[in-house]
Image (cartoon, rainbow, N blue to C red):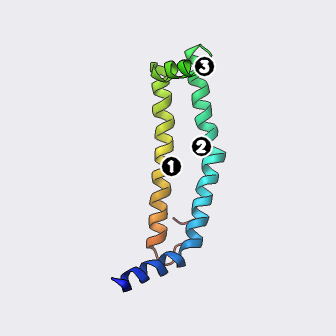
Amino acid sequence: MRATLAWALSRALARIRPAQAYSIAFKALNVFLLAPIGALVLRTCLTRWGRASVGNFEIAAFLLSPIGLVALVGVGSILLATLYLELAGLMKLLAAEHLAWWQA
């Protein structure tokens, strides 16, 4: 049990730098590419809805409208897909012996 724990800890510590670089690259991708796309989708759906969303009830009414549900599902799908891709890459990076962060 102790040997397995020590092996897992040493393995994780040996792969921490590539994992950090990969995580930072994915965060930069989210900030510079996917956040503006999500904002554009929401803005487009809000302009099609036709009313200004100022308060909490207006925002809730927008999200419960058909256009709001499309926006919510679209933006949520993009966010979940990037989260799953990041986690899959991190698992592959931590499992492989000599894999660079850009190859994951």
Q: CA distance from mark 3 to mark 1?
A: 27 Å
Q: CA distance from mark 1 to mark 2?
A: 9 Å
Q: CA distance from mark 2 to mark 3?
A: 22 Å
| Vertical comparison of 71 with 48: above or below | below
Amino acid type of the residue that numbered disc 2 sits on in the rendered structure: Leu
Label 2 Cα crowd, 10 Å radius (few <14 / some 14-19 / many 20+): some
Q: Which residue is mark 2?
A: 34
Per the image, label 1 sits on a secondary structure element best described as helix
Which residue lies under the disc numbered 1?
82
Q: Is residue 101 visible?
A: no
Say what amino acid the circle numbered 1 marks.
Thr
Name the residue at the left extreme. Answer: 1
Residue found 62% across the figure and 33% down from its top = 39
First in residue order: circle 1 vs circle 2: 2
Upstream in sequence: badge 2 or badge 3: 2
| Image-based side of 6 in relation to 24, left or right | left
Q: Which mark is residue 53?
A: 3
Three-letter amino acid code of the residue under disc 3: Ser
Q: Counting other residues with Cα less than 10 Å from the Cα at mark 1, is it few (<14), some (14-19), or many (20 or more)?
A: some
Label 2: state its secondary structure: helix
On the image, the x and y values in percent for residue 41 come to 57, 30
